Image (cartoon, rainbow, N blue to C red):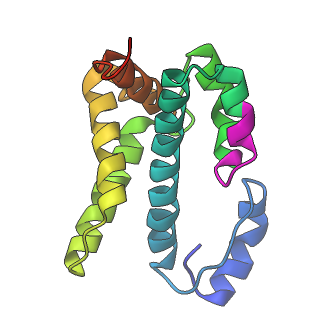
Amino acid sequence: MGATRAAYKHVEPLLAALGSPQHVRGPGAGAAAKLVANLVLGVAITALGEALALADELGLDRTVALDVLADTPIGAIVSVKRRNIESDSYPPAFKLRHALKDLHLVDQTAHRFGDTLGVTAAARNWLAQATAEGAVDLDISAVVATIVAASSRCPRHGRG
């Protein structure tokens, strides 16, 4: 939360009931921290989708692939979103539309500083494709199905 130390101490007990609050400095810092965190979430969930698409291409069992990925740096996302992915059902916890909006804000912010964030742009493109295909009000993890489906539609070069 971005707030003065006194304001943070005043509302910390209320916020603790909702999760694990962190004081990230003065007013406005909370919004900045949210953008940074949601950038990582967007990139990680699309990396998960691409990893599963590759696993499918390589003939790796989905359960095995998810087990392996659970022991990687994106393991927390795998454990939180695994049920959605395995059931191919994406009830919204964090709607894809909001994740896409946040990645647009990340890009706008980066451009203000003269930066280009290529990995973020790739993640944003996957989220935009999932949105265009109707997943706009589903959970962000629905992008995994979009990525896997797109991979399965690609022609297989060099395969018998």
Quadrant in the picture for the C terminus: top left
Q: Is residue 53 above or below residue 36?
A: above
Quadrant in the picture for the N terminus: bottom right
Q: Is residue 28 left or right of residue 120?
A: right
Which residue in the rendered view is the most extreme toward the top? 160
Q: Position of residue 23 (x, y in %)?
A: 65, 78
Q: Position of residue 4 (x, y in %)?
A: 59, 87
Residue sitting at 23 percent across and 66 percent down? 108
Residue sitting at 25 percent across and 76 percent down? 115
Of residues 54 and 107, which is closer to you in this image? Answer: 54
Residue 134 falls in image quadrant: top left
How many numbered circles are shown? 0
- Residue 139 appears anywhere in the view: no
Q: Position of residue 113 (x, y in %)?
A: 24, 81
Q: Is residue 137 above or below residue 21?
A: above
Q: Is residue 11 left or right of residue 150?
A: right
Q: Is residue 79 above or below residue 99?
A: above
- Residue 38 appears anywhere in the view: yes
Q: Is residue 71 magenta?
A: yes
Of residues 153 and 104, which is closer to you in this image? Answer: 153
Residue sitting at 52 percent across and 52 percent down? 41
Residue 22 falls in image quadrant: bottom right
Magenta segment? 67-75
Q: Is residue 108 magenta?
A: no
Q: Position of residue 82 (x, y in %)?
A: 67, 30
